[in-house]
Image (spheres, rainbow, N blue to C red):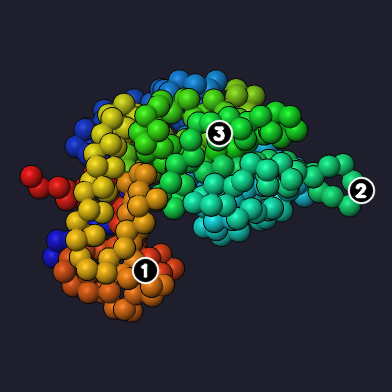
């Protein structure tokens, strides 16, 4: 049976061009800095993000937690949005790996109030932890994008209080398409960015971390500590190079398809699409705006060959990507 797989943009498979690139990639031991393909990918990523240096890591979760570890001291507090990936979907890793405490702020459509961020910053007091980091997510997991003016405002707070910002930019290229800007215009307001090569960009494995050379040097050592020192990783990095050079150019198609899908879904009686969260390649929908679907609705879709992402039983999430073609003209 063939499926239309809307569960996530992580299900995309490597393209033919990627497979060829894997075979041809010059390789070496990357722990010694000897893999020319990894080095090329890291240079390309740094340049695209407008940062001094970059580091290839095994996954997005790895990259985020590596950055939390590298920015903070044990016992620090990290300010982030209550529903963000780092807090909600990374197995509590920040407390295990970096040993930090999270101070979360309930946002609106993934966006924390600027005032609340500033209020959450701790002053010097014998009772208080030190505020070590602010984390942002762009694009957010709820289908929205943080605009550049907002990013700049958070940057001003961060500079005023001398607290670094880490950006979970798993889908930063989707955010850039949505904002009509380059990724480096988003990245300019933060100290480090993690972004995924394996989400929507079709690479099979891998994410990148970017920042200053000093930060990346320390992160490289922490990556080894976390067991992420890979040897002939060029075989994966080769796909990452194709992902960055080629696949980033077509993400707007996924956004168009999401809008097309939203329009078609709304033609069904009782179907409610969250239009205010239709900014990237995701469509969130409920039936009749009620909080519960008929329990078997995703099952019903599955029988028709459609896989969807359940969102805590309340909403259905449809993610559009390279390996599904919905729009048939
Ligand atoms: C997917 C995702 C991650 C983590 O990526 P993995 O490679 O699955 O570990 C981090 N942040 C956000 C916002 C994501 O969507």
**Cα–Cα span, label 1 and label 2:** 48 Å
The answer to whether 35 appears left or right of 294 in the picture is: right
Determine the secondary structure under disc 1: loop
| Quadrant holding the N terminus | bottom left
Cβ atoms at labels 1 and 2 below 8 Å apart? no
Q: Nearer the viewer, residue 86 or 73?
A: 86
**Cα–Cα span, label 3 and label 2:** 31 Å
Looking at the picture, does residue 297 appear above or below residue 101?
A: below
Residue shown at 26% from the left, 54% from the top: 262
- The mark that comes first in sequence, 3 or 2, is 2
Residue shown at 31% from the left, 26% from the top: 245
User: Which disc is residue 304 wearing?
Assistant: none
Q: Nearer the viewer, residue 104 or 231?
A: 104
Q: Is residue 237 visible?
A: no
Residue shown at 14% from the left, 61% from the top: 2
The answer to whether 96 appears left or right of 197 in the picture is: right
Residue 155: name its quadrant: top right
Residue that sits furthest to the left in the current view: 329
Residue under numbered circle 3 = 151
Residue under numbered circle 1 = 289
Question: Does the Cβ of the disc 3 residue fall within 8 Å of ligand 1?
Answer: no
- The mark that comes first in sequence, 3 or 1, is 3
| Closer mark to the observer between disc 3 and disc 1 | 1
Return the x and y of residue 196 as percentages of the image width and height.
42, 40
| Quadrant holding the C terminus | top left
Residue under numbered circle 2 = 126
- The mark that comes first in sequence, 1 or 2, is 2
**Cα–Cα span, label 3 and label 1:** 32 Å
């Amino acid at each position: 049976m063939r499926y239309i797989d809307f569960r996530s943009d992580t299900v995309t498979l490597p393209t033919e061009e990627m497979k060829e690139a894997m075979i041809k990639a010059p390789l070496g031991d990357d722990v010694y800095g000897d893999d020319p393909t990894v080095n090329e990918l890291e240079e390309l990523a740094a340049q695209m993000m407008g940062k001094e240096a970059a580091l290839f890591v095994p996954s997005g979760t790895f990259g985020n937690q590596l950055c939390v570890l590298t920015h903070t001291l044990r016992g620090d507090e990290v300010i982030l949005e209550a529903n963000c990936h780092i807090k909600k979907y990374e197995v509590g890793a920040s407390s295990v790996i970096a040993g930090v405490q999270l101070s979360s702020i309930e946002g609106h459509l993934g966006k924390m109030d600027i005032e609340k961020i500033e209020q959450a910053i701790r002053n010097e007091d014998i009772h208080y932890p030190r505020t070590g980091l602010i984390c942002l997510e762009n694009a957010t997991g709820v289908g929205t994008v943080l605009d550049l003016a907002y990013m700049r405002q958070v940057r001003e707070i961060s500079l005023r209080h001398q607290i670094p910002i880490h950006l979970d930019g798993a889908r930063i290229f989707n955010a850039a398409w949505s904002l009509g800007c380059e990724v480096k215009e988003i990245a300019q307001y933060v100290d480090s960015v993690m972004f995924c090569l394996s989400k929507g960009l079709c690479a099979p494995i891998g994410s990148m971390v970017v920042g200053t050379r000093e930060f990346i040097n320390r992160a490289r050592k922490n990556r080894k500590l976390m067991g992420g020192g890979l040897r002939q990783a060029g075989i994966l990095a080769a796909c990452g190079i194709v992902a960055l050079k080629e696949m980033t150019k077509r993400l707007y198609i996924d956004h168009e398809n999401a809008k097309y899908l939203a329009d078609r879904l709304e033609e069904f009686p009782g179907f409610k699409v969250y239009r205010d969260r239709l900014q990237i390649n995701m469509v969130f929908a409920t039936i009749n705006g009620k909080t519960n679907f008929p329990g078997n609705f995703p099952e019903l879709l599955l029988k028709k060959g459609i896989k969807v992402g359940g969102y805590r039983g309340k909403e259905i999430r449809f993610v559009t990507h390279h390996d599904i073609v919905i729009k048939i003209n």
